[in-house]
Amino acid sequence: MKVSIDTNSGFCFGVVNAIQAAERVLEQESRLYCLGDIVHNNKEVERLTSLGLEIISHEQFQNLRNEKVLIRAHGEPPETYKIALKNGIELIDASCPVVLKLQNNVRIGNEKMQQKDGQLVIYGKQGHAEVAGLAGQTSGEAIVVNSEEDLLEKVDFSRPVNLFSQTTQSIEGFNGIVKTIEAKQKEKGDSNFVINDTICRQVSHRAPQLRIFSQNHDVVVFVSGRKSSNGKYLYGVCKETNPRSFFISSKEEIDLSWFKSGDSIGICGATSTPRWLMDEVAEAIDNL
């Protein structure tokens, strides 16, 4: 069997920045709090926890006083910064620059929509950390949709619409939402629709790259944390292209029955999958 790792897989720059920020603090201090999982990969979270990173919830954050807390790449709503100021918390802000720019544009876009009785719509996953941060810029007024069904149920197409997207959503899904809004507004006789394609291209370009990668191997082993939305989407791309694609979170989940003698095996992962974990999986397969 021949095993190779996709060179395009692994952490995006926003995740790299957050992890490096945590490591820098933990080189000097024995503990650093992090508001939510620093990355949606349990193995990487376990590694950083062993160095002194302590994951906390928003409820626990509200009760902290005079501590250091890392804000991960997903970003946070304004309320988080207010609580930090009130409680004397020092924030290590590792919000992704792409997300910070998007938050600012969402805030401005919502102000414009309020002036014309319009609606700001975010295409994303309800409850996702990034989406919570975006909706927080609108004081919760934004309409979050994750499907055409959501869209038809929540949006009034006779009123203006300003559309944004969670940075890690699929381009195909976003384009589908755009087409539906355009068609429904046409039915209502309204064409007041602003489209903001805010999908991160570093993430979205991985889908076509993975299609090619999956075509070039007999078996694909996709490595990702099970909480990762990006991981679920990219694994779906692999599975659609190559039916012999398998999702794992660690080397312990590898199944020998997946492979045949002479197979070309490709290992790839999500934007939240560390390279060391893919290396570990490759070594485990080699040892089979």
Image (cartoon, rainbow, N blue to C red):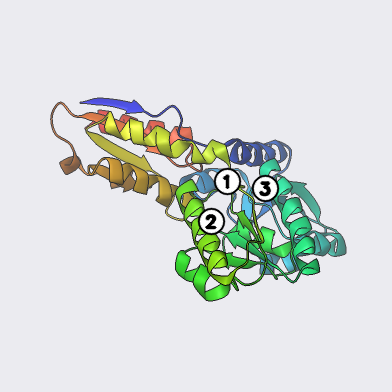
Query: What mark, if any, has residue 99 been given in the picture?
Result: 3
Instruction: Judge depth for marks 3 and 2 and give the one in front.
Output: 2
Left or right, 38 with respect to 105, comes to left
Q: What's the CA distance linking mark 1 and mark 2?
A: 13 Å
Vertical position of residue 22 compared to residue 40: above or below: above
Residue shown at 51% from the left, 58% from the top: 177
Q: Earlier in the sequence, mark 1 or mark 2?
A: 2
Instruction: Judge depth for marks 3 and 1 and give the one in front.
Output: 1
Q: Residue furthest left?
A: 261
Residue type highlighted by circle 1: Ile
Could you tell me if the residues under marks 1 and 2 are in contact, i.e. CB atoms within 8 Å?
no
Q: Which element carries disc 3, helix, strand or loop?
A: helix
Query: Residue 95: x and y, percent?
Result: 69, 46
Residue type highlighted by circle 2: Val
Q: What's the CA distance linking mark 3 and mark 2?
A: 21 Å
- Residue labelled with disc 1: 199
Q: Residue furthest front?
A: 189
Closer to the camera in the image, 226 or 250: 226
Looking at the rendering, which quadrant does residue 186 occupy? bottom right
Closer to the camera in the image, 49 or 256: 256
The quarter of the rendered structure image containing the N terminus is top left
- Residue labelled with disc 2: 178
Packing grade of label 1 (10 A; few <14, some 14-19, many >=20) is many
Query: Residue 185: x and y, percent?
Result: 57, 66
Q: Earlier in the sequence, mark 3 or mark 1?
A: 3
Residue shown at 35% from the left, 41% from the top: 222
Residue type highlighted by circle 3: Val
